Every structure is written in structure tokens, then in C-alpha cells.
Amino acid sequence: MGYVRIVNAISNPGPGRIVLLTTSHRVAPGLLSWPAWQALHAADRVLCADGTHPQLPYLREAGIPVEEALPAAEELVEACADGRTVVVVATGEGEPALTDGLARLAGGGRLRMPELELLPASYDLPGARLLDLVQVMDRIREECPWSSRQTHQGLAKYGIEEAYELVEAIEDGDRDELREELGDVLLQVVFHARIAEEDPDAPFSVDDVAATIVAKLIHRHPHVFGEETASTPEEVKEHWLRTKAQEKQRTSVTEGVPLHQPGLALAAKLASRVRTAGLDVPLPAGEDIGHELLTLAIRAEAEGVDPEAALRGAARAYRDAIRAREADPTA
């Protein structure tokens, strides 16, 4: 009985197999998954429509012959006759014409269709799309008449505007707007890093920017990456402040506080530094509005309230009241 099954298998081979091999341009060519290498080595034929596909040199180096061709769907089905396996190394578009043609053939019911397998040979890791942003920024910097002339100083105002728009999206609770505004802020970072590459004296790239913040985060989280422990947010903040002080070696708690930030935020930040350091600093004497606002900002910080956010909330309510009066002056 076993002999009969073997004879039947030989005389009636399966319909064959088409493997559509996809790769990510965000992963270095040649770095393919083990199932992909297995499929390539076991294939009867390997095809690729693009003779300049970045994977081809690495496949040939591995001893895999690649035909620079891509037959039509019906021809490909015929190539899989007698149980043969054909691997198609897909181009960036994923060969939609081929897959559409195979779908039409399968729907027609005239042909015995081979198995069709989609095999991702390389995968995007989290953050991989950032590589696309860097590439797009490179091209814009080189080819756009406006972007190619921008400087750090000229872009500074946009960074402030985008940060405020991000805060507004957060406070409004608009998820779509939040995603867009985060992208706009990210663009500012990548744009400045791209400009910095061209500095003749002290150039740096977006990779240097990322490396700097990675090193900072690791150093300031010894409870995550080191041997220290922290079980509460207060302990985490203590670690952060201690390591930050060691890094900066500052002589005053006021160092590092940007003086160009909005006044209420500036006052709250200074009050936070004073409170954290355990200093007893009396408020400067004065009875004008500036000193009154300073007192309110320090009070808000002590109560855990962001004075800028509180004032924006009140201002929005005032805006709504204005619009209501404009809509109905008699109300």
C-alpha cells in the first residue's frame, strides 16, 4: 500500500508553489530571515523583475541563481507544473500586477493553481519609518529652494509654534491632531539635525542627536539600566535630579532654566527648583501686577498646578463667552 502511495505521488505531483518574497528597504540588504533563505535555496527558480534590486548581489554571493525576469501570471503558473517551486523576489511595489493576475486565474477556475505564499524576508523594527523621514529630509534640503536656505536661527520660531500647537492638541484631546502635531515637532528635530551636518566647525547628525539622548536616558535611569532601585515616582525623580546634577556640575539651581519661556512657566520652574533644593527664598518686594502674577505662579506650582495650562483653560472659557456674546448680544 505504501508503494502505491509513492507511485501516485510521483505520477501526480502537486500543483507547485509560488513564493512572493518581500523585503524592507529599511533593513540592510542581505539580512534575510532564515525561512527566506530556506525558500531561496530550495526553489527550482528564483525570479526578480528588477535587475538593480539591492538584494540580488547578496543572493548571488550566496550561490542562488536569480533570473532577471517576471513572467505573466499564466506563464508563472505553468512554471510551477510538476510540483516545482518558484520564488519571486518582489520589488518595492510588491508586484501588484502579478498578484492581480494570479487572482483572476484562480477565480476563472480553468487552471490548477499552485500554492501562493507571501513570505516577508525582512521586517521593519519599531522606529524604522524614521529612516524614511531622514531620507526625505535629505532630499528636501538638497532640492527645495526654501528648505535649502534655512538656518537654525530662521527655524527657531517654528519650533516654538509647533510646540504650542502640540500642547493645544493634547489639551483638546484630539488624537488625530496629536499624531500630526507630534510629526511636526519631529520634523523640527530632523530639520535642525540636517542643517547641523553642514556646519564646517562642529557638524553633527541626527544619529548623534539620538545617541546623545539615549546615553542621557540610560544614565538618568539607573533603576532601569543599573543596579539602583526605585518603586515610586518620587524615587525616580530623585535619581533623575541626582544624576543630572552630577552631569551638569551647576553652581546655581537657576542654571539651565530658559529665560525666554512664557513668564508664568518661568516663574513656576524657578519655584520648582527652589522647592526641590530646599531653599528658603523670600519673594522680591513689589505691589505691581508682575509681582502678583509671580505670587500666583509660585502658589500654583506648590499646589501641583501648571499655571500656563490653568491660564489657557481660563482664556478658552473667556473666548467661548466672547463668541456667545457675539452670537447673541442680548444674552
Image (tube, rainbow, N blue to C red):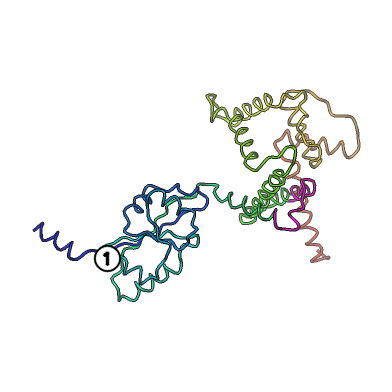
User: Viewer-proximal residue, 87 or 268?
Assistant: 87
Quarter holding the C terminus is bottom right
In the picture, measured across the screen, residue 132 lies left or right of residue 58, that is: right
Q: Residue furthest left?
A: 1
Counting from the top left corner in percent of width and height, residue 132 is at 59, 52
Q: How many marks?
A: 1
Residue 88 falls inside the magenta stretch: no
Residue 22: image quadrant is bottom left
User: Viewer-proximal residue, 167 or 93?
Assistant: 93
User: Viewer-proximal residue, 232 or 89?
Assistant: 89
Residue 286: image quadrant is top right
Residue 290: image quadrant is top right
In the picture, measured across the screen, residue 98 lies left or right of residue 113, that is: right
In the picture, measured across the screen, residue 95 lies left or right of residue 220, that is: left
Q: Residue at x 50, y 48 (%)?
A: 27
Q: Is residue 250 above or below residue 39?
A: above
Q: Is residue 270 above or below residue 142?
A: above
Quarter holding the N terminus is bottom left
Q: Which residue is mark 1?
A: 15
Disc 1 marks a residue whose amino acid type is Pro
Residue 150 falls inside the magenta stretch: yes
Q: Residue at x 33, y 68 (%)?
A: 77
Q: Residue at x 68, y 55 (%)?
A: 140
Using a 10 Å C-alpha cutoff, classify the residue at mark 1 as few (fewer than 14 neighbours), some (14 to 19) or many (20 or more).
some
Q: Is residue 12 above or below residue 261?
A: below
Counting from the top left corner in percent of width and height, residue 209 is at 65, 39
* Magenta-drawn segment: 142-161
Counting from the top left corner in percent of width and height, residue 186 is at 66, 48
User: Element type at marker 1?
Assistant: loop
Most frequent secondary structure within the magenta stretch: helix
Counting from the top left corner in percent of width and height, residue 48 is at 43, 61
